[in-house]
Amino acid sequence: MEKNDKKKITPEIDEAMMMAIMADGVKKEGLQAQPEVSVGSVAEKSLGKERSKAKKASDVDYEELFFKKAETTARDGKSVYIRPDFHERLSRIVQIIGEDKISIYAYLNNVLEYHFQEFGDQITTNFNNKYKPIL
């Protein structure tokens, strides 16, 4: 029972809101920003800081960041399985916003590249904190 008490507390994510945003797709009037929820716990406050970083990044044009040709081809990569609803959503994004000029592979490559640039330090820190070599 003590093991359960020692688990790390993760911030709650409003899955219903996320799914609603993703499931609705792109509407005629565009995407609607959700109002930011006030947060109480320390973990949720740090999540709020991450959101503010993401807002700063939104100053850069989304299409310039994510709808550029990939330097490699899908053939050079590895297969990864994603949920069918995500695949459908990604297809629509690439078709509509990307005007069918890039592949899902190129779009995901750009999204992941941005993710690793944005969160690389945190990923490295968390990895090093959890990775304890034998010697």
Image (cartoon, rainbow, N blue to C red):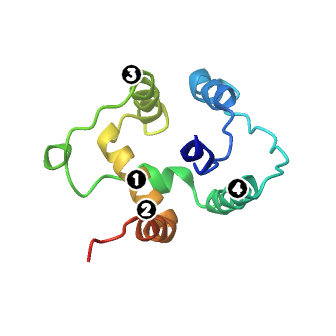
Left or right relative to 17: residue 120? left
Left or right relative to 135: residue 17? right
Mark 3 residue crowding within 10 angstroms, few (<14) / some (14–19) / many (20+): few
Residue at x 50%, y 64% (from the top left corner): 119
Question: Which of these two is toward me, 3 or 88?
Answer: 3
Residue 103 seen in render: no
Which residue carries the number 2 mark?
Answer: 116
Name the amino acid, label 3.
Pro
Which residue carries the number 4 mark?
Answer: 43
Which residue carries the number 1 mark?
Answer: 112
Q: Quadrant of residue 20?
A: top right
- Distance in Å between CA atoms under marks 2 and 3: 24 Å
Residue at x 76%, y 37% (from the top left corner): 34
Q: Quadrant of residue 17?
A: top right
Label 2 close to label 1 by CB (< 8 Å): yes
Mark 1 element type:
helix
- Distance in Å between CA atoms under marks 4 and 3: 31 Å
